[in-house]
Amino acid sequence: GIRTILSLNAAREMIEKFKSATQNAYDEAVKVLKLIGLANGLLMGSMLLAYIVLVLYGSYLLYDNVIKTGCDPSGALGTPCTPDASDVFGALLGITFAASVLPQ
């Protein structure tokens, strides 16, 4: 054990071997974690992109309908729009729940 290493004056050599071995293990672990982080970031980014596209397209449909027909997007005061604000929000929630169970 340690007495043999100390008696042979090999302490520095053993410290260097230990540093080398732990550095290799660290480098391999970090390499995997970088890939996991990239995949996680791409997944989050794709979800955000889907939300942006859905909200912008739904808002455009709603705005276009209000301009053309004069409907009420809230549905409280006059003729309700089709699609209305709750349809856009419902589609957003539907995509969220579908995407959460997709990997299973």
Image (cartoon, grey):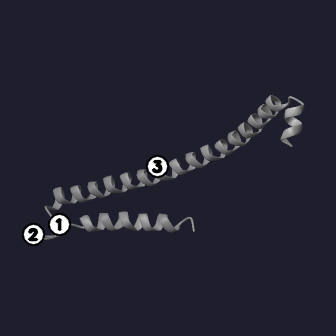
Find out whether the residues at labels 2 and 3 contact each other: C-beta distance under 8 Å.
no
Find out whether the residues at labels 3 and 1 contact each other: C-beta distance under 8 Å.
no
Q: As drawn, which residue projects farthest toward the left?
A: 77
User: Disc 3 or disc 1, which is closer to the eye?
Assistant: 3
Say what amino acid the circle numbered 3 marks: Gly
Count of labels shown? 3
- SS under mark 3: helix
Q: Which numbered dot is residue 16?
A: none
- Residue located beneath label 1 in the image: 74
Question: Cα distance, mark 2 to mark 3?
Answer: 38 Å
User: Which residue is located at x 86 percent, y 28 percent?
Assistant: 9
Say what amino acid the circle numbered 2 marks: Leu
**Corner quadrant of residue 31:** top right
Taking 51 as reference, is 28 left or right?
Answer: right
* Mark 3 crowd level (few <14, some 14–19, many ≥20, 10 Å Cα): few
Find out whether the residues at labels 2 and 1 contact each other: C-beta distance under 8 Å.
yes
Question: Cα distance, mark 3 to mark 1?
Answer: 31 Å
Residues 97 and 65: in front is: 97
User: Which residue is located at x 26 percent, y 68 percent?
Assistant: 86
Say what amino acid the circle numbered 1 marks: Ser
- SS under mark 1: loop
Q: Which numbered dot is residue 77?
A: 2
Taking 93 as reference, is 19 left or right?
Answer: right
- The mark nearer the N terminus, 2 or 3, is 3
**Horizontal and vertical percent position of residue 17:** 80, 34
**Horizontal and vertical percent position of residue 61:** 27, 58
User: Which residue is located at x 9 percent, y 69 percent?
Assistant: 77
Q: Is residue 99 above or below residue 43?
A: below
**Horizontal and vertical percent position of residue 28:** 71, 42
Question: Cα distance, mark 2 to mark 1?
Answer: 8 Å
- The mark nearer the N terminus, 3 or 1, is 3
- Residue located beneath label 3 in the image: 45
